[in-house]
Amino acid sequence: MSAAATAAVREVSAPQTRRFVMGALFIVFGLVLWFGFAQGVEADAVTTFGLTPGGVTTTLRDWTLQTRPALTVLALVCVFIGAVELVRGLGRFQNLALGLVVGFFVFGFLVWATAGKSMNLGGLLNASLDKAVPITLAALSGVLCERAGVVNIAIEGMMLTGAMVGAMIGSAAQNSMVGLVAAVAAGGGLGLFHGWLSIKYKTNQIVSGTVINIFATGITSYISALLLQSRPELNSPVIFPTFPIPVLSQIPVIGPILFLNNPFVYSMFFFLIVIQGALFFTRWGLRHRSVGEHPKAADTLGINVFRTRYVAVLLSGMMAGFAGAYYTLGSVGRFDEVMTAGRGFIGLAAMIFGNWTPFGAFGASLLFGFADAMSSKLAILGIAIPSQFLLMTPYIATMVVLAGVVGRGQMPAADGVPYEKE
């Protein structure tokens, strides 16, 4: 058999194999819902979900479900979708079906965990969005940088520096906007330093990012112990208040979740739309992406590869600084050592999960945020499953994605490769 024929056979067999794997996976989800969850609850058990997010005065009636019938319906739907996938294939709707089945499975898990109890589902969704904000901003930082061909694993250090600088300057000025500008500037400065090492001197980009992370962790911890703990007036910034959007914030359930937030949440949605549009629908975005895919071809067409990449790392650092400011100026209201807790690295995982696209990264960030919020809620309910296993869920999902179960990621071709001008 010729090489061309072999390649053709592989192209045909790969979708077939994926179809059978996905179909079997859907059926397994359904069987787990039935045998693992539905059969383990009392026949007359009732699940109660509250629909009123915290911080609102109006209340909605609770949503009650008969636990076993609800789980049975969810299990049958998952098995049905799996059977259709095995027999006929869902084609271009395959990934949509995967999202639906995973959603049904997660909802079924919540129904089972809350059997005979009650959970504020509105509060869970609200907490999920809040926890997804810094992860999404970190992922956007990664998208801006890596789309131009520069790997930026220093997002964690940039976030941590932005959080500390924002707290100190915001406290000294007693102005949250001044603190925010300082945080963004600090992140941008570290971004330029990363670009100076990796673009001009062609330092290994992983090494450069690691150096920044180590430096940021050390210097922020040192300043915190030396200055912020002894002078609390430098660690008490004014946080941004919550702004309700008229009319929209009054929409039941989703209104308070989406339209009753601080400026960081609104800014996240703004940046999502702007970056998505700028990257894929403007001349600037085409040039930005070209230096991450084919820098030599871009250089031949007159695009300044070095300048474009410097702009990319600058914007990436500024976005990371903005993400770090969320902790001190939008959430906690003070700086604590290593308070970002690895969210910069999780943002990179969300970026990869989202296939280097802003809205894909946002969806992945919501998954991480939901898992984090759900682990806290279920710990309150006293579920026997350790919370650490729940926190593992998004990481397992990321590995599944990277293994190609939902399609292989399309990383920029020149990502992490220093450009040598001829």
Image (cartoon, rainbow, N blue to C red):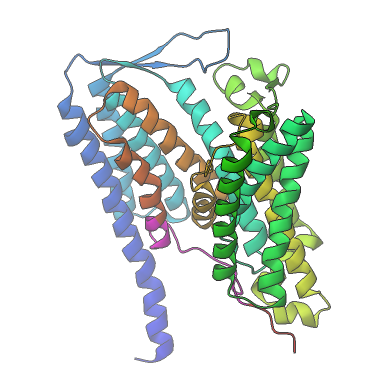
Q: Is residue 326 above or below residue 138?
A: above
Observer-nearest of 98 and 175:
175
Q: Is residue 170 magenta?
A: no
Q: Residue at x 68, y 20 (%)?
A: 248
Query: Is residue 373 in view?
Result: yes
Q: Number of numbered discs present?
A: 0
Q: Which quadrant is the N terminus positioned in?
A: bottom left
Q: Does the magenta stretch include residue 414?
A: yes
Observer-nearest of 383 and 331:
331
Outermost residue toward the right in this view? 302
Left or right: residue 117 compared with residue 420: left
Q: Is residue 12 above or below residue 234?
A: below
Magenta stretch: dominant SS? Answer: loop
The magenta stretch is 399-417
Q: Residue at x 58, y 75 (%)?
A: 204
Relative image position of residue 392 (x, y in whole percent)? 35, 46
Q: Is residue 121 above or below residue 365?
A: above
Query: Is residue 357 in view?
Result: no
Relative image position of residue 198 (x, y in whole percent)? 66, 72
Relative image position of residue 141 (x, y in whole percent)? 64, 53
Q: Which residue is drawn at 27% across and 28% down?
A: 71
